[in-house]
Amino acid sequence: MSMPGGFEMVIIVLVILLLFGAKRIPELARGIGQGINEFRKASDDIKKEIDKGKEGVEESTRYEEKKSTEKETTEQKNN
């Protein structure tokens, strides 16, 4: 199925005008825009939380590696 052409788009716009009226279309567009902004904001928040989690895992991994290295060094000094 292909994208609607020029004539089909005109018909779609006319149907929307008949269903909602010229006064309600700006309200609908504003509501859709606010919804998209909220979705983007939530998406960014989720990405930030995932990045924080990754940093925490990397930090704990570095801590464990450092702890392991210190333990090996101490064992070699004792032998």
Image: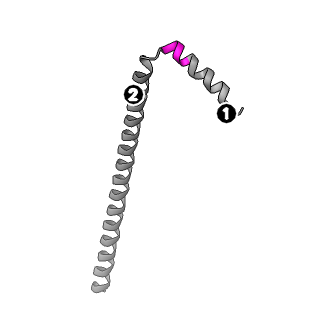
Placement of 55 over or under 1, stated as above or below: below
Label 1: few (<14), some (14–19) or many (≥20) C-alpha neighbours in 10 Å: few
Q: Nearer the viewer, residue 68 or 47?
A: 47
The residue that disc 2 covers is: 30
Give the residue at x 36% y 62%.
Answer: 58
Label 2: few (<14), some (14–19) or many (≥20) C-alpha neighbours in 10 Å: few
Q: Main secondary structure of the magenta part?
A: helix
Q: Which residues are magenta?
A: 16-20
Side of 73 where 18 appears, left or right: right
Measured as percent of width and height from the top left, residue 5 is found at: 67, 31
Give the residue at x 43% y 27%.
Answer: 29
Label total for image: 2
Placement of 79 over or under 10, stated as above or below: below
Measured as percent of width and height from the top left, residue 67 is found at: 30, 70
Give the residue at x 31% y 72%.
Answer: 66
- Whichever of callouts 1 and 2 sits on the residue coming sooner in the sequence is 1
The residue that disc 1 covers is: 3
